[in-house]
Structures are given as structure tokens and as C-alpha cells.
Image (cartoon, grey):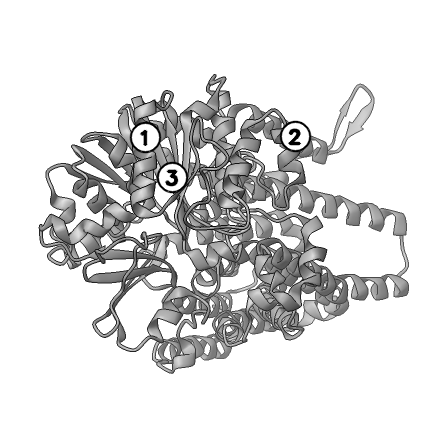
């Protein structure tokens, strides 16, 4: 029987390992970009696979040196979890140079291997436990998975109280503590001898105390988070006079407040060049080192906000009188101020991150003019899509704020992130919450050749058609400035008076009307000149009978996004890569969407690492072994396919639960927790399953498990969407 301290040590170590896996998602969102999330699970499994191969080579030594091997590997996990990440972030890796700088794939590969090392050590501990306690595999696996499930959710709770880097240090300490618990002296009932000597236990306990004091006393700059120099925060802090005022951290993001009295912020996306007004004093708020939002100084004097009438997002306020507004993405309050400037009767502002609300409401309340305390402003801490779905209120205007940064968006770094705000189903819900003649307004960055604007237009056309609108062109209007575009969707057809107002609004501000009902070919492309009126041509093509053909032959992927394919920011087409690569010397690579090439590079290096660290050693072992090779082949294929199925279902759940839980980190933590805990319970129960004979046929107990997987997967497909 396995002593309880050893069983607890296994569970604690697994909790630390899964906590480390989830925490890496948060850390990489800060130091790089969150599209590296898929890499984390891959490198975790690489570490486990390499461990299995390694132990297949040394398994004869496990029986004699089991305790020593476990303790050494647990200690190495504790140290490497911290050290390997700190080293990895020192590598000069830049995903934007991946295809033309031959050093970058090497940096990526080195980072990949470095971060897999801690998983290798923890997998060694679990695997040798399987081998040593092979008569109790179900119990070991159950403790492993139950601990892993609790660790996945536990690190999420931990991030509400400590910074991500401190959480990393705590996980390292937990690895060392597992070595302490495993070395607690316990008597072997069979021999009456101690499993481990008191001397070893004392030594490991002392090591943990010293390591804890050392880790939390490190203040050297290399032991801090090194945010990519290509992120907005890093670039802003290089400007003369910039200084950090405050940092706040939670699972939803690392918020950094920056001010500059020397060279003030002038953040007004797409501000008309005709504007004689400029923004007031502003404080910048960066989320994970990017995605700039600002807090405007507001003294109650309306004229200080005159610049807000010269943004493309101001158009709906010229078509509505004292509207009731729903603002999705309150941020620092700029869009709330714009609504108040234009005499909105009431503003419901939705913001996912409560810490941003606290900054405006508490820390900088006087600076912001007590904006969120206004009588006609109500703040809701919620996810935008979920708030609209659960709301029974209709609005005159629903405005989707400009939430992402221009730099990351233009580089295609959001391509692999799920976004359920710009899907067909989301737009359908928004439209159903509009009053008669109400407007949905969505502002996006302009990228050339056009991508965002046309994909959003195509998605909106699909949403209107799904809603039973036979002539969607009568409900749409699109304008653009030099940096942003704003799409209007009306609950009803645009009137001649509204079109006249739209044209006057654009002429006064030198904005271009890209589309409105009845627009003539000579009206677009008058101010912010392009070689051709691309936005007008695209909009009219998407409204025409050959829209599918236009989408198919367009250089970028502008297929409407849906909840089943919520990758709105994925515009990449493989057929464009050779053309852009051929033009790399003349700036063509700047037109590439980087999400997919980085994914491909990571996949290739994962395959190479797997061959070198897992497959080749196994082939060497097979040549030296004898036995029932056919049976071994069946076992190998069984576990290979089972692992693929497990990961495929797990990844699908994570993607879908981003919609339900509003944030990728929540989805990863909750899904991993549920999968691990119930897999652990299944492992504990598996000892009770026995072969049965039915009608003369012997049924293997695995058949029941596999049947259960298939049945519940089908039930999920049927029940989850309506649920």
C-alpha cells in the first residue's frame, strides 16, 4: 500500500505542474502575446513524452533508487520552473521576424525546449511512481489527476492575490515542498523499515526553507518580467518623460498606468485632420503591456471634449437624439465621455476587468471628473456578449468600442485568439436588442489592403440575412477616416435625411463614405485617397449575388466569423504567402498576418523535438527488445489515439468555454480542472471494472469507457449550444 505522505506529494507535485502550465498562459500574454497559449500545452506534453522515453531507458534502476530519483526530480522541477522561464524571456525572440531572420526559429526552439524542462522533471516523478507502485496504478493516476485539476483552478485563484511572477515562485516552492512530503519517514508495513531516513527528510526541509528565502529576496532586473520591446508599453516608456504611476494584476491582465508631462498622450484613434481641438491631459492604461486605453482629465467643461466630435465613432450621435446607449468596452471612459458629450440620455457601460473600473472610480476619480458616478451612467462589470444575451433592455445605440491595439492587430497577432464579439451570432443578438430605428456602431482599425472592415461587413450581412432581412444593404452604412472605420447597422432602413446627415458629417471632417444605400461609384474615395475605392468595391460585392465568389478569390480570408469558427482576426490565406515572400525586399512581408506562420513554426519544432526526444530513443529500445511486438504495437496505438482524442476534446471545450466564461484563462483553468478531476475519479474507479461475458462474448472493460466517451461527446454536441 502507498503511504499517504507519498500519495499527497504526488498530488501536490501534479497541482504545481498544472498550475505552472496555466500560469505560463498568463506570463506569455504579458511578455509576448497570448497567441502562444497553444504552445504551452504542446511543450507540457513534450516534457511528459520525453520523460516516458527516458524512463524506458533507465527503468531497471528505478526499483533500487526510487525515493532518491523522486526527490531529485521534484527538487529540479521546483528550481527549473522559475529559472527556465527567467532564462527563456531573456532570449531576443521576435515573432514578427520569424520568416526572414534565421536566428528567430532557433530562439523559438530554444524557448520551447527550456519551458519543457520542468514538465520533464515532474513527469519523471509521476512515471517512476507508476513503475514502483505498479500494483496501484489506478490510485497513483487518481492522485495525479485530482491534484492536477485542483492546481489548474488553484493558480487562477492565486492570481487574484499575487503577481504572476510571485505566483511562479510559489509554484517552484510547491515543487520543493512535494519533495519534503515524499521524504517524510514512514514505515514499510512489510519489512518494518523506514521508507526514507530522517537525515534525508531534514536535508530536504532545510533546502526548501533556504530556497524560499532566496527566491523571494531576488531583486535583480533579470528576475522581473521582460515585456517585449515591440509592445506599446515598452515603446512608450522609451519616450522622454514617461513614467509608471501604478501597476495592478489579476487573471484578466496586468494593468500599467503611465503618465508623461513632457510629451503628453494624445490618444484619439482616427481623429479627423480637420479638427482644431485636441484631447485634454490623459493617463495611459496598458493591459499586458499593450492595448492602450486612456483616462481623460475631465473638469465638467464640455468644450474640453470637442475633439470627440471629430472621430468616426461620433457619427451615430448625429443620427440619433438623446439616445439610450449601451457601450461595450468602457475601459478608461473615453467612449462614455463621448456619449455624454453628445447628450446621451443614459449610458450602460460594460467592462470585463473590474480593476480598470476601480482605477477610474477610485484611484483617479478626481482626474476623471467622477465620470462613473454621473447620474445617467451605470457601470456593469461583465463580459459584453454575456451581458447583452442576458439583458431584457433595448437601446437606441449599441456601440462596440475599439478594444485592441493597432500594432498587434495590424501584425496579425490576434489571428489565433477566439473573439465572440464579432461573430454572426453576436451581431444577431446585438441587433435584437435595438429599439426601432436604433443603431449598432462598430469601430475598427483600418488595415490596407482592407481586412477587418470587409470581414466585419461580410459578417454583418450574414447576420442580417439570418435575421430575415432580405435587403441588408438598406440597413448598412460604412465610413472611414485615415486610421479607423465605423460600420453602422440600423434596425430599419436608412432614410434619405439620415443619408444626407451622414454625408454632411463626412464632408465636414474629411471622412470618406465607403457605403450607404444608394451611394454612387464616384462618391467614395474623396479625401483619404486610395489607388481604388477598395472599401466601396468590397461592400457592394459582398451585397451582390456573387458575394461567395468574391470572398473565395479575395487575397485575405474575409469569411464571416461564427461561434463555431470565432477567429475574426484570422485573415491569413496560404496562397498569399509565396507572393508576399517574393516581395519581402520591397516591404511585402509587412502585409503578412503572422498568427498562422508562428503556429506552423511551432508545430514544426514540436514535431522535430518529438522525433528527437521521444520517437528515436523508442526505436533504439525496440531494436534491442524481444517479446510480443504485435501486442506492444496495439498498446502503443491505443494510447496514441486515446491521447489525441483526449486533447482534441479538451481543446474544443476550451475554445467553446471562452464564450461561456468570457476569458481564455478562465476557460483553460476551468476545463483543465474538470477534465483532470473527472479523469482522476475515473482512474480511481477503474480498478472496479472487470471483464464480462455477454452472449458468449468477452467484453473488455475499456469498451465501457470508450462507449461512455462517445455517448457523452455526442450529447455535448446536441445539448451545449442551447444550454
- CA distance for labels 3 and 2: 41 Å
Residue 146 on image: x %, y %:
50, 48
Disc 3 or disc 2, which is closer to the eye? 3
Disc 1 or disc 3, which is closer to the eye? 1
As drawn, the label of residue 442 is: 3
Say whether residue 707 is left or right of residue 392.
Answer: right
- Among numbered discs 1 and 3, the one appearing first in the sequence: 3
As drawn, the label of residue 436 is: none
Instruction: Return the residue nearer the eye: 31 or 207.
Output: 31
Marks 2 and 1 close (CB-CB < 8 Å): no
- Among numbered discs 3 and 2, the one appearing first in the sequence: 3
Picture quadrant where residue 567 is located: top right
- Label 3 residue SS: strand
Say whether residue 578 is left or right of residue 413.
Answer: right
Q: Look at mark 1 in the image and give the residue it sits on.
A: 500
Residue at the image position 27 percent from the left and 48 percent from the top: 310
Amino acid at each position: 500500500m502507498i503511504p499517504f505522505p507519498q500519495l499527497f506529494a504526488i498530488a501536490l507535485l501534479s497541482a504545481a505542474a498544472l498550475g505552472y502550465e496555466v500560469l505560463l498562459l498568463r506570463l506569455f500574454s504579458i511578455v509576448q502575446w497570448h497567441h502562444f497559449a497553444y504552445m504551452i500545452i504542446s511543450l507540457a506534453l513534450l516534457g511528459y513524452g520525453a520523460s516516458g522515453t527516458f524512463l524506458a531507458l533507465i527503468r531497471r534502476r528505478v526499483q533500487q533508487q526510487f525515493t532518491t530519483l523522486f526527490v531529485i526530480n521534484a527538487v529540479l522541477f521546483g528550481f527549473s520552473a522559475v529559472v527556465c522561464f527567467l532564462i527563456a524571456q531573456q532570449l531576443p525572440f521576435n515573432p514578427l521576424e520569424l520568416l526572414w531572420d534565421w536566428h528567430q526559429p532557433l530562439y523559438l526552439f530554444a524557448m520551447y525546449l527550456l519551458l519543457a524542462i520542468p514538465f520533464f522533471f515532474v513527469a519523471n516523478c509521476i512515471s517512476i511512481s507508476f513503475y514502483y507502485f505498479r500494483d496501484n496504478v489506478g490510485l497513483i493516476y487518481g492522485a495525479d489527476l485530482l491534484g492536477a485539476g485542483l492546481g489548474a483552478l488553484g493558480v487562477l485563484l492565486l492570481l487574484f492575490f499575487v503577481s504572476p511572477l510571485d505566483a511562479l515562485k510559489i509554484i517552484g516552492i510547491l515543487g520543493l515542498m512535494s519533495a519534503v512530503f515524499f521524504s517524510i519517514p514512514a514505515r514499510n508495513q512489510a519489512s518494518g523499515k523506514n521508507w526514507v531516513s530522517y537525515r534525508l527528510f531534514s536535508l530536504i526541509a532545510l533546502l526548501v526553507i533556504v530556497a524560499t528565502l532566496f527566491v523571494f529576496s531576488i531583486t535583480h532586473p533579470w528576475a522581473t518580467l521582460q515585456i517585449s520591446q515591440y509592445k506599446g508599453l515598452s515603446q512608450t516608456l522609451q519616450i522622454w518623460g514617461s513614467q509608471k504611476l501604478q501597476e495592478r494584476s489579476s487573471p484578466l491582465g496586468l494593468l500599467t498606468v503611465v503618465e508623461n508631462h513632457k510629451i503628453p498622450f494624445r490618444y484619439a484613434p482616427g481623429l479627423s485632420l480637420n479638427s482644431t481641438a485636441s484631447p485634454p491631459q490623459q493617463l495611459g492604461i496598458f493591459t499586458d503591456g499593450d492595448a492602450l486605453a486612456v483616462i481623460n482629465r475631465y473638469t465638467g467643461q464640455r468644450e474640453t471634449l470637442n475633439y470627440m466630435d471629430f472621430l468616426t465613432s461620433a457619427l451615430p450621435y448625429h443620427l440619433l437624439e438623446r439616445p439610450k446607449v449601451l457601450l461595450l468596452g468602457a475601459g478608461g471612459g473615453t467612449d462614455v465621455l463621448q456619449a455624454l458629450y453628445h447628450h446621451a440620455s443614459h449610458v450602460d457601460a460594460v467592462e470585463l476587468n473590474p480593476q480598470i473600473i476601480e482605477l477610474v472610480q477610485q484611484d483617479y476619480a478626481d482626474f476623471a471628473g467622477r465620470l462613473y458616478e454621473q447620474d445617467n451612467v451605470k457601470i456593469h462589470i461583465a463580459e459584453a456578449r454575456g451581458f447583452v444575451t442576458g439583458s431584457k433592455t433595448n437601446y437606441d445605440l449599441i456601440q462596440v468600442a475599439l478594444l485592441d491595439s493597432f500594432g498587434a492587430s495590424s501584425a496579425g497577432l490576434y489571428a489565433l485568439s477566439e473573439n465572440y464579439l464579432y461573430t454572426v451570432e453576436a451581431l444577431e443578438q446585438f441587433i435584437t436588442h435595438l429599439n426601432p430605428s436604433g443603431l449598432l456602431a462598430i469601430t475598427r482599425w483600418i488595415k490596407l489592403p482592407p481586412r477587418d472592415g470587409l470581414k466585419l461587413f461580410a459578417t454583418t450581412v450574414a447576420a442580417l440575412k439570418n435575421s430575415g432581412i432580405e435587403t441588408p444593404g438598406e440597413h448598412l452604412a460604412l465610413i472611414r477616416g485615415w486610421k479607423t472605420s465605423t460600420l453602422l447597422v440600423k434596425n430599419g432602413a436608412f432614410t434619405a435625411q439620415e443619408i444626407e446627415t451622414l454625408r454632411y458629417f463626412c464632408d465636414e471632417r474629411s471622412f470618406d463614405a465607403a457605403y450607404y444605400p444608394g451611394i454612387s461609384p464616384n462618391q467614395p474615395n474623396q479625401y483619404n485617397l486610395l489607388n481604388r475605392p477598395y472599401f466601396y468595391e468590397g461592400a457592394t460585392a459582398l451585397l451582390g449575388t456573387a458575394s461567395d465568389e468574391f470572398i473565395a478569390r479575395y487575397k485575405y480570408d474575409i469569411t464571416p466569423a461564427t461561434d463555431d469558427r470565432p477567429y475574426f482576426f484570422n485573415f491569413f490565406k496560404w496562397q498569399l504567402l509565396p507572393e508576399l515572400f517574393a516581395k519581402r525586399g520591397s516591404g511585402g512581408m509587412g502585409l503578412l498576418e503572422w498568427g498562422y506562420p508562428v503556429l506552423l513554426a511551432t508545430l514544426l519544432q514540436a514535431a522535430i523535438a518529438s522525433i528527437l526526444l521521444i520517437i528515436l530513443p523508442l526505436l533504439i529500445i525496440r531494436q534491442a527488445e524481444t517479446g510480443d511486438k504485435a501486442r506492444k504495437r496495439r498498446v502503443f496505438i491505443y494510447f496514441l489515439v486515446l491521447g489525441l482524442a483526449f486533447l482534441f476534446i479538451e481543446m474544443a471545450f476550451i475554445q467553446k468555454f471562452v464564450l461561456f466564461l468570457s476569458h481564455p484563462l478562465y476557460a483553460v483553468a476551468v476545463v483543465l480542472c474538470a477534465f483532470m478531476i473527472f479523469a482522476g475519479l475515473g482512474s480511481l474507479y477503474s480498478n472496479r471494472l472487470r471483464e464480462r461475458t455477454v452472449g458468449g462474448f468477452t467484453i473488455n472493460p475499456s469498451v465501457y469507457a470508450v462507449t461512455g466517451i462517445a455517448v457523452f461527446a455526442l450529447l455535448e454536441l446536441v445539448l451545449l449550444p442551447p444550454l
